[in-house]
Amino acid sequence: QQQVKQSPQSLIVQKGGISIINCAYENTAFDYFPWYQQFPGKGPALLIAIRPDVSEKKEGRFTISFNKSAKQFSLHIMDSQPGDSATYFCAASIAGNTGKLIFGQGTTLQVKP
Amino acid sequence: EAEVAQSPRYKITEKSQAVAFWCDPISGHATLYWYRQILGQGPELLVQFQDESVVDDSQLPKDRFSAERLKGVDSTLKIQPAELGDSAMYLCASSLVPGGAYEQYFGPGTRLTVT
């Protein structure tokens, strides 16, 4: 019940296209859902996060869509650029708890020029 | 911009040897996390400190792993003896306060290879 399942494992998108990464969770106590971006040789960095009281959050080209009833959330990258090529991790935690993040397995995105 | 510092960046050790990793969190961050990231997987929390106290070490293999944050600032993670399955990236993160809704800032990690 602590798992966060992420798909796809890898994704190849043409420059200018839309990249979509999906995550699903079981624990209904989760109430904070961040996405992290990780470049090779670097630690993960927070990209965007959402709380379940909203169904969508947009920051620039990055949008999180959240479906509380389905216990699913997704990351959309609009107008994907080669510089977006990285590994993306969804995560979940309980906001009022210790802060422990449960990460998905990761999606390696390659944006072709 | 303040960053989480980790050293060494890379470590190769033989099976059964001892190894230690160091982390210096962002100044003023009371909460410090150690994660292990196996290749191709997401990070998994090993231990969490609030100041110098351990808050969560439920996933830390305590027979071989130990962690300390004596003065509530920098931290050391030790493995003794190292096993082949310990090969992974060890990530340190910090946050200003505990709680799931506060951003965790990650360091660049230490890549451990056990031969």
Image (cartoon, rainbow, N blue to C red):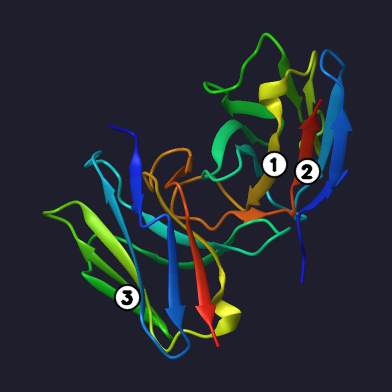
Type of the residue with mark 3: Lys
* Quarter of the figure that contains the N terminus of chain B: bottom right
Q: Residue furthest left?
A: A69
In terms of image quadrants, where is residue A96? top left
In the picture, measured across the screen, residue A55 lies left or right of residue A42, that is left
Type of the residue with mark 1: Met
Q: Secondary structure at mark 3?
A: strand
Which mark, by number, is residue B89?
1
Q: Nearer the viewer, residue A67 or B3?
A: A67
Tell me what residue is drawn at x 39 percent, y 45 percent: A93
Q: Which residue is mark 2?
A: B110
Do residues under tags 2 and 1 come within 8 Å of each other at their CB atoms?
A: yes
Q: Which residue is mark 3?
A: A57
- Cα distance between the residues tagged 3 and 1: 31 Å
Name the spot of residue A12 as percent of width and height, x first: 45, 72
Q: Chain of mark 3?
A: A
Q: Residues within 10 Å of mark 1 (few under 14, many from 20)?
A: many
Q: Nearer the viewer, residue B10 or A99?
A: B10
Name the spot of residue B109 as percent of width and height, x first: 74, 48
Q: Secondary structure at mark 2?
A: strand
Name the spot of residue A107 as percent of width and height, x first: 46, 58
* Quarter of the figure that contains the C terminus of chain B: top right
Q: Are marks 2 and 3 on the same chain?
A: no
